[in-house]
Image (tube, coloured by chain):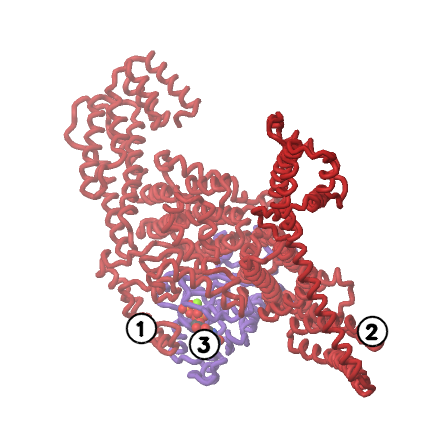
Chain colours: A purple, B red
């Protein structure tokens, strides 16, 4: 039933409603643009195994609703996330302006170690652009975020976003900056890793955030 | 006649001899006959001489005798002279008398003879007349002949006089001219014959087959009539060639009919074949064309998707098979669609051919002149078409089966797989309409694929459900108050059907289930695919798929289709709508501006939230169903499962079993997550059904926790099972402030109840999907044993809160400190009652607090209190049963305490009647039961534990050791038998 992988990362996709979060996830998993996308109710879920730096990583991705009324539901999913895609819509200054709030929420709820990737979505609508690349890059730099512009429609940079985020997490694990063993790290060893290392006495069941 | 003639001759001779001229009054035209008779005087002359005296006794003689007596001589010779004869007889002596008598005798004789003659004449007159007429005829014919001969003679004479050599020359020339004209005509015919070849080609190019063939046939018959010309022999050979060629063209045209039916063209072809007398052969040919058209088209489609790079040089038999395998996965669906559309065109053509024949057979039938031959042909065609239909569908199915099997669908995305199923489902509908086929082969192949696919898919769903459950915060997910699962996108294609079934459930029960099943969601309602797509389009165009669903929706309920839109604006709670009006994907700029405004104030909003909700109070809370993110996930999966079973009835049962597992897992998780801290094990809390359900789920669905050592050994059975779920660590059920996770527990249990409600609402549809009775039984069992127990879970879960909200340990400790051995009746209740009531007061307050930000229904409210009371009551009994020694005063105090408790409780809760009051009261009062009745009472009250009962008899039979021991034995036995705990 469960495939083999080295790591399992818990990911979040957050950002204002209509930024294109669900479309990004759909594009990433189904390789198709979901043109009849409607507002997400609560939280949706998707998972995919990717190859990053010779390791196979299973991404467990939670696509949250951007609408305010779902905040209480969605916030509970922040906890123990290893990475997050913070999405705004380049054709909407307002979605960009809301970023700092989202960022604050993510850092406080998910933990300071969460790796956040800023995604400016709807790159294909360049004519309607309200937020310049430069401006967003500046914001990213100030907040120590990795930044990419993507299009869920054309698929540009969608997979790259997830890969880049995963890569960063992986390198942080390797440098010891992140400790997968720590509770609520949002990282788990997969079956493959176990076979390789096989030194962990207490085997975690493959749930993200279970107390040990 | 000859005798007659003979007699006549004699007779006329006789008359002549007699010389009798007497005229008889006869109208005989013959002079010769009349002449002798007319002369009467002649007879009388000789009679004068022969007269004899009449004394002779001759009178007595009869006519015959008289006739006899006529002398022979009179009849002998023709030139007999009677007068002489008589005169000769007269002797020398003339005796007058003798002569007279003789004359007299002769007279008499003559009279007789005359009479005789007259009678003879009368009898023969008719024959005489006829003969006479004939003679006259002959005469006139002779006269004519004579005149013809005369005319001829005279003309011959003229000819003889006028004929010359020139005239003869003219005649000869004339004859020659006639002959030449004949030849010219023939030559002209031959010329047209030669030209007709070209004309036929023109006709053929214009597809005027009927005219072409009729012309050809005309030419042929003309050619045979001109066989005497040497050149015609060659020409008719050529005509035969042309005919052969034309028939080939006809055949080609017939082949084209398979791809695209053309009514006029087909009419032409049929007429042409009819002229050739090959109507039947044409049908056979047509069948062959259809068969090969299916083969070639399928192959062509597949080839076009495989691409030119793949050069396949395999034998044609295996070719299709091999090619199918080469279709790339991403091309599978477009290729399937193309295959459907292309083969649809062929099937449709055949359908129209059949229709054509139907129409035209009728035409011939009304024509009374239809002979046996025609009706025989019609019958042949009909049968042929019928068998052809079955065969064609068989072929089509085979093509699809091969194609479907060529790819492993297991790796397909669900939506894509559904799409495949959608196509196949549509195909089967077409098959049904085309020839009433159930498409068994197709069904079989797709069923196999589906089973594999679905098993894998379901495992994934369960796994996903587990992840959801383990991440679930059990927070209420806001949806609009009238939310039902039908509003989810996953149910979109099912809404119509489910609602329809819901509406017509009653009617359906009355109708025979099969007939209604057919019409429920077969799309043939609107006039069949063949009539709708006969000219253009196919039922397999993607646009038509959507149209279908919409159609159904429109037919069934026109009440606000907007309801079904997944647009979440719909789901905004009433009081929030103001803020969300402009939100929507239609206008992204507005959409996001709203978000931003909200977000800028985010901190403040959140900060103010508590205040706002407080002031709002309970009444303004959204009264929507309580459900969680995970509930939605389960419902979404249900929708997907049902979509699949709708498209493939044969897997419906597997799908429903899986669907039931999703619910069971949810039920199990809620129970596992929220009853771990159940303080009192109380049989009163669990219904029998709930216990059974949990036990079954645990045994059938949940994989036992792995032993760290033997983790490799997972048996096959367990592989299909799901791991034990674990509650997310962010859920805190230990905080007394929040009543030990009251809101989480309420949301969890109520979301389960909501899920059960939703399953109830789709039950008719599930039953509709499964026609097989024993399988229906499974559904019934599922609803009875699993779905209906959802609300039973309230009590145990809420009792956990009660058990912790009340400080039961302290209560028991305080009860132990009460002196139950007092003799006099006290007027003051014990302090523990106040303590527990205080706990209850706090509970009540916290409940109010919780209710201010979470909608708690009356039902839930009551159940929460009920659980509290149950826990309390059991603690009362437990505490009482701890008193090993007890006097009547103590017993009375117990009653007092409990009455005090109840009266205070009634002020705290609106729950009426207070449940389980009896449980405590009965126990306390049992103390007063006479010893002889105690055994009966014990046997009847198994709700108490053996410990309770043991203490009871210890107190009740304080002074009678024997009874005590006997009753103790009874209790032990009951415990052994498992009647009590
Ligand atoms: N042109 C274009 N449109 C996009 C793109 N991504 C998303 N959209 C459109 O933007 C709208 C919102 O997309 P969603 O993915 O539903 O937005 P969301 O962030 O999930 O919204 P919530 O679920 O409400 O939080 C949809 O109408 C999409 O079609 C993109 O890259 N290009
Ligand atoms: Mg979304």
Q: Are marks 2 and 3 on the same chain?
A: no
Q: Chain of mark 2?
A: B
Q: CA distance from mark 2 to mark 1?
A: 113 Å
Q: Looking at the picture, does residue B39 appear above or below residue B95?
A: below
Query: Which residue extends farthest top?
Result: B962
Ligand 1 within 8 Å, label 3 CB: no
The residue lying at 66 percent from left, 64 percent from top is B274
SS assignment at label 2: loop
Q: Looking at the picture, does residue B724 appear above or below residue B483?
A: above
> Left of B58 or right of it: where is B520?
left
Choose top left, top right, bottom left or bottom right for residue B109: top right
* Tag shown at residue B228: 2
The residue lying at 25 percent from left, 64 percent from top is B612
Ligand 1 within 8 Å, label 1 CB: no
Residue that carries the numbered disc 1 in the rendered image:
B601
Image spot of residue B470 (x, y percent) = 47, 53
Which of the two discs, 2 and 3, sits closer to the camera? 2
Nearest to the observer: residue A118 or residue B316: B316
For residue B1, say whether it is visible.
no
At label 2, counting other C-alpha atoms closer than 10 Å, the crowd grade (few under 14, some 14-19, many 20 or more) is few
Which of the two discs, 2 and 1, sits closer to the camera? 2
Q: CA distance from mark 3 to mark 1?
A: 21 Å
**Ligand 1's quadrant:** bottom left
Query: Which residue extends farthest right?
Result: B230
Image spot of residue B108 (x, y percent) = 62, 34
Image spot of residue B358 (x, y percent) = 56, 59
For residue B542, say whether it is visible.
yes
């Amino acid at each position: 039933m469960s495939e083999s992988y080295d790591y399992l990362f818990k990911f979040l996709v957050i950002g204002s409603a209509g930024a294109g979060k669900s479309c990004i996830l759909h594009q990433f998993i189904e390789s198709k643009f979901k043109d009849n996308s409607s507002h997400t109710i609560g939280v949706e879920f998707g998972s995919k195994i990717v190859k990053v730096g010779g390791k196979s990583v299973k991404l467990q991705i939670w696509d949250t609703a951007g609408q305010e009324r779902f905040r209480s539901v969605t916030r509970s999913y922040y906890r123990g996330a290893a990475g997050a895609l913070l999405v705004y819509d380049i054709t909407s200054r307002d979605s960009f302006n809301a970023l700092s709030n989202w960022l604050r929420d993510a850092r406080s709820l998910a933990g300071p170690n969460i790796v956040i990737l800023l995604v400016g979505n709807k790159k294909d609508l360049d004519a309607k652009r309200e937020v310049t690349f430069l401006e967003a890059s500046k914001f990213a730099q100030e907040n120590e975020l990795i930044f990419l512009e993507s299009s869920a429609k054309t698929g540009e940079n969608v997979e790259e976003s997830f890969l880049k985020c995963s890569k960063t997490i992986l390198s942080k694990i390797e440098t010891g900056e992140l400790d997968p063993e720590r509770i609520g790290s949002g990282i788990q060893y997969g079956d493959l890793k176990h076979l390789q290392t096989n030194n962990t006495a207490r085997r975690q069941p493959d749930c993200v955030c279970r107390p040990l | 006649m000859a005798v007659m003639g003979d007699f006549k001759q004699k007779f006329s001779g006789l008359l002549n001899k007699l010389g009798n001229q007497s005229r008889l009054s006869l109208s005989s035209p013959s002079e010769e006959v009349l002449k002798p008779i007319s002369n009467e005087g002649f007879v009388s002359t000789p009679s004068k001489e022969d007269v004899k005296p009449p004394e002779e006794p001759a009178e007595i003689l009869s006519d015959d005798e008289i006739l006899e007596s006529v002398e022979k001589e009179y009849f002998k010779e023709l030139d007999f002279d009677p007068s002489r004869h008589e005169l000769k007889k007269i002797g020398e002596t003339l005796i007058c008398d003798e002569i007279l008598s003789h004359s007299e005798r002769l007279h008499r004789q003559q009279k007789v003879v005359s009479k005789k003659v007259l009678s003879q004449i009368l009898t023969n007159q008719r024959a005489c007349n006829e003969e006479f007429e004939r003679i006259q005829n002959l005469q006139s014919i002779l006269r004519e002949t004579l005149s013809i001969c005369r005319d001829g003679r005279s003309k011959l004479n003229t000819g003889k006089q006028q004929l010359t050599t020139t005239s003869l020359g003219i005649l000869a020339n004339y004859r020659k001219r006639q002959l030449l004209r004949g030849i010219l005509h023939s030559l002209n015919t031959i010329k047209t014959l030669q030209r007709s070849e070209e004309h036929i080609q023109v006709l053929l190019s214009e597809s005027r087959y009927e005219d072409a063939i009729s012309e050809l046939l005309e030419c042929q018959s003309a050619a045979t009539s001109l066989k005497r010309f040497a050149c015609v022999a060659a020409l008719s050979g050529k005509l035969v060639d042309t005919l052969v060629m034309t028939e080939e063209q006809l055949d080609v045209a017939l082949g084209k009919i398979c791809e695209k039916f053309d009514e006029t063209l087909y009419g032409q072809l049929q007429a042409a074949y009819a002229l050739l007398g090959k109507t039947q052969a044409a049908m056979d040919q047509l069948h062959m064309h259809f068969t090969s058209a299916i083969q070639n088209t399928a192959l062509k489609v597949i080839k076009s998707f495989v691409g030119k790079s793949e050069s396949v040089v395999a034998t044609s038999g295996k070719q299709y098979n091999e090619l199918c395998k080469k279709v790339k996965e991403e091309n599978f669906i477009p290729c399937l669609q193309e295959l459907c559309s292309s083969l649809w065109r062929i099937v449709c053509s055949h359908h129209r051919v059949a229709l054509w024949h139907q129409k035209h057979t009728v035409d011939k039938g009304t024509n009374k002149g239809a002979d046996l031959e025609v009706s025989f042909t019609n019958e042949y065609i009909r049968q042929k078409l019928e068998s052809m239909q079955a065969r064609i569908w068989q072929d089509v199915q085979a093509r699809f089966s091969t194609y479907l099997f060529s790819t492993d669908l297991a790796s397909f995305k669900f939506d894509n797989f559904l799409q495949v199923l959608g196509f196949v489902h549509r195909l089967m509908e077409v098959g049904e309409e085309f020839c009433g086929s159930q498409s068994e082969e197709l069904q079989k192949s797709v069923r196999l694929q589906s089973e594999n696919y679905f098993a894998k898919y379901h495992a994934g769903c369960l796994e996903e459900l587990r992840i959801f459950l383990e991440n679930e915060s059990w927070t209420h997910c806001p949806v609009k108050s009238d939310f039902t699962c039908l509003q989810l996108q996953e149910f979109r294609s099912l809404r119509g059907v489910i609602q329809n079934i819901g509406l017509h459930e009653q009617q359906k029960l009355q109708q025979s289930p099969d007939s209604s099943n057919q019409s429920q969601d077969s799309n043939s309602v609107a006039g069949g695919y063949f009539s709708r797509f006969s000219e253009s389009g196919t039922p397999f165009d993607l646009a038509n798929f959507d149209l279908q669903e919409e159609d159904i929706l429109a037919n069934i309920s026109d009440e606000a289709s907007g309801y079904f839109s997944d647009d979440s604006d719909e789901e905004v709670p009433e009081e929030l709508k103001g803020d969300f009006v402009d939100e929507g994907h239609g206008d992204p700029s507005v959409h996001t501006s709203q978000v931003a405004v909200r977000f800028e104030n985010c901190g403040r909003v959140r900060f103010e939230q508590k205040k706002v909700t407080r002031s709002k109070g309970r009444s303004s809370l959204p009264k929507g169903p309580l459900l969680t993110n995970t509930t939605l996930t389960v419902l979404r999966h249900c929708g997907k499962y049902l979509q699949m079973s709708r498209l493939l009835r044969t897997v419906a049962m597997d799908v429903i079993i899986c669907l039931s597992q999703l619910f069971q897992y949810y039920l199990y998780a809620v129970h596992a997550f929220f009853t771990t801290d159940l303080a009192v094990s109380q049989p009163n809390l669990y219904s029998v059904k709930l216990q059974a359900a949990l036990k079954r789920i645990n045994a059938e669905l949940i994989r036992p926790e792995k032993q760290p050592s033997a983790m490799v050994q997972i048996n096959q059975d367990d592989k299909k099972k799901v791991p034990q779920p674990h509650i997310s660590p962010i859920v805190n059920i230990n905080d007394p402030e929040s009543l030990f996770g009251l809101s989480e527990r309420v949301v969890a249990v109520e979301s389960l109840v909501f899920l059960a409600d939703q399953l109830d609402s789709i039950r008719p549809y599930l039953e509709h999907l499964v026609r097989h009775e024993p399988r229906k039984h499974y559904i019934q069992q599922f609803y009875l044993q699993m779905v209906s127990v959802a609300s039973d879970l309230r009590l145990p879960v809420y009792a956990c809160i009660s058990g912790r909200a009340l400080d039961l340990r302290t209560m028991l400790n305080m009860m132990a400190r009460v002196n139950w051995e007092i003799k006099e009746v006290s007027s003051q209740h014990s302090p523990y009652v106040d303590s527990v009531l205080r706990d209850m007061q706090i509970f009540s307050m916290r409940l109010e607090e919780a209710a201010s930000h979470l909608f708690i229904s009356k039902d839930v409210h009551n159940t929460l209190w009920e659980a509290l009371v149950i826990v309390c009551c059991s603690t009362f009994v437990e505490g009482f049963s701890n008193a090993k020694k007890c006097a009547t005063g103590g017993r009375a105090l117990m009653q007092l305490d409990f009455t005090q408790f109840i009266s205070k409780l009634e002020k705290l809760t609106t729950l009426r009647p207070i449940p389980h009051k009896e449980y405590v009261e009965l126990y306390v009062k049992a103390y007063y039961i006479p010893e002889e009745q105690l055994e009966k009472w014990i046997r009847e009250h198994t709700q108490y534990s053996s410990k309770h009962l043991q203490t009871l008899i210890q107190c009740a039979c304080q002074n009678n050791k024997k009874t005590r021991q006997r009753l103790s034995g009874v209790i032990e036995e009951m415990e052994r038998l498992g009647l009590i705990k």
